[in-house]
Image (cartoon, helix red, strand yellow):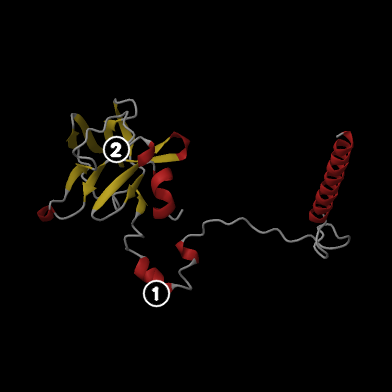
Amino acid sequence: MRKRTVIGVAIGVALAGLVAVAVRSRVGRQARPAPGLTSATPGSPAAPAVPAATFVGRQACAPCHARETELWIGSHHDLAMQEATAATVVGDFGNARFNYHGVVSTFFKKDGRYFVRTDGPDGALHDYPIAYTFGIEPLQQYLIAFPGGRYQALNVCWDTRPQAHGGQRWFHLYPDENVTHDDILHWTGPYQSWNHMCAECHSTN
């Protein structure tokens, strides 16, 4: 019995040694650079630095893609997200009011800027400046800047359809639910974050 034990131990030690040699050999092969690809060849010039990719805007593409640019200008994609100005805002900001389950939001202008007074993450009413418009047809949403570089999409939107078709009015995206400030669907919550829910598919830069 003792002889079998000694033989078993010897075989185990031998196998462990073979595995160690194989692993060491493989690691050595991976660590060695391929011929001709050494990064520090004496006397060779340094590889040129590749500039970081940056957003160049439509003006860089238009000269070679005139027809595509012509079709794109004024399209829904072109107008999808714009700074809130008199030329881009289509909603009624003339002290218009909208009542949503007792929360009254007021849309107004001050010093040439567009604002909404509505319930914030604490449930109290606050004045928020509109940073961007989002969308153009059949509705227009409004993005509001928050700390940390995030933008939140207001749940109260402007119906851009003609009045004869039921448009030209403020409405809530969840009309039959009472979405309060502590609800995950509230406009200040993660599900209404432009950065998290909108930017990847609907914004270029």
* Residue that extends furthest to the left in the rendered view of this protein: 164
Closer to the camera in the image, 111 or 138: 138
Q: Type of residue at label 2?
A: Phe
Quadrant showing the N terminus: top right
Specify whether residue 154 is in view.
yes
What element does badge 1 sit on?
Answer: helix
Which residue, given by chain and number where applicable, does mark 2 sit on? Answer: 115
Q: Type of residue at label 1?
A: Arg
**Real-space CA distance between mark 1 and mark 2, rounded to the nearest whole angstrom:** 38 Å
What residue is at 27 percent from the left and 32 percent from the top? Answer: 118
Residue count near mark 2 (Cα–Cα under 10 Å), binned few <14, some 14–19, many ≥20: many
Which label is found at residue 184? none
Q: Do the residues labelled 1 and 2 touch (CB within 8 Å)?
A: no
Is residue 4 rendered to the left or right of residue 65?
Answer: right
Q: Provide residue 2's location: percent of width, then percent of height.
A: 88, 33
Q: Provide residue 163's location: percent of width, then percent of height.
A: 12, 52
N-terminal of the two: label 1 or label 2? 1
Closer to the camera in the image, 35 or 17: 17
Is residue 29 rendered to the left or right of residue 162?
Answer: right
Specify whether residue 144 is in view.
no
Which residue, given by chain and number where applicable, does mark 1 sit on? Answer: 67
What element does badge 2 sit on?
Answer: strand
Nearer mark to the viewer, of 1 and 2: 1
What residue is at 18 percent from the left and 38 percent from the top? Answer: 176
Q: Provide residue 69's location: percent of width, then percent of height.
A: 40, 69
- In which quadrant of the rendered view does residue 44 lie? bottom right
Q: Provide residue 87's location: percent of width, then percent of height.
A: 29, 53
What residue is at 24 percent from the left and 38 percent from the top? Answer: 108
Residue count near mark 1 (Cα–Cα under 10 Å), binned few <14, some 14–19, many ≥20: few
Question: Is 116 rendered above or below residue 75?
Answer: above
